[in-house]
Image (cartoon, rainbow, N blue to C red):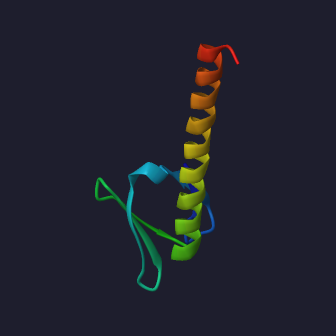
Amino acid sequence: MIYVTRLNGKKFYINAELVQLVESTPDTVITLINGAKYIVKDSAEEIVQRILEYHQTVSGSKDKIMEARTSEETGA
């Protein structure tokens, strides 16, 4: 999940896995894979950066889990 800010200043979270498109029109519009659209204050660049950080975090967590499993299996 990543946080975004509505035009009225309220923050909410969206599932980064469901983001299909982020565009500036000039408002930033986030389109999810189910067709839902959200207009937010955050710039498209900020949203993309948060999505990238989310994926890096998730990927890093998966790597750590796999390393732990390998260590347990080999007794290291």
Query: Residue 56, image x and y in percent?
Result: 58, 52
Query: Residue 44, image x and y in percent?
Result: 51, 75
Residue visible at 56% across and 44% down in the picture: 58
Of residues 9 and 15, the one nearer the viewer is 15
Is residue 34 depicted above or below 42 in this figure?
above
Tell me where residue 72 sits by quadrant. Answer: top right
Query: Residue 16, image x and y in percent?
Result: 48, 53
Q: Residue furthest bottom?
A: 26
Residue visible at 31% across and 55% down in the picture: 33
Is residue 24 depicted above or below 75 in this figure?
below
Of residues 31 and 70, the one nearer the viewer is 70
Q: Which residue lies furthest to the left in this view?
A: 35
Left or right of 32: which side holds 15? right
Residue visible at 63% across and 34% down in the picture: 64
Is residue 42 shown to the viewer in this render? no
Of residues 46 and 55, the one nearer the viewer is 55
Query: Residue 70, image x and y in percent?
Result: 59, 23
Q: Which residue lies furthest to the right in this view?
A: 76
Residue visible at 59% across and 61% down in the picture: 50
Is residue 73 depicted above or below 58 in this figure?
above
Tell me where residue 76 sits by quadrant. Answer: top right
Tell me where residue 31 sits by quadrant. Answer: bottom left
Left or right of 39: which side holds 20? left
Q: How many labels does the image show?
A: 0
Is residue 44 depicted above or below 60 in this figure?
below
Is residue 65 shown to the viewer in this render? yes
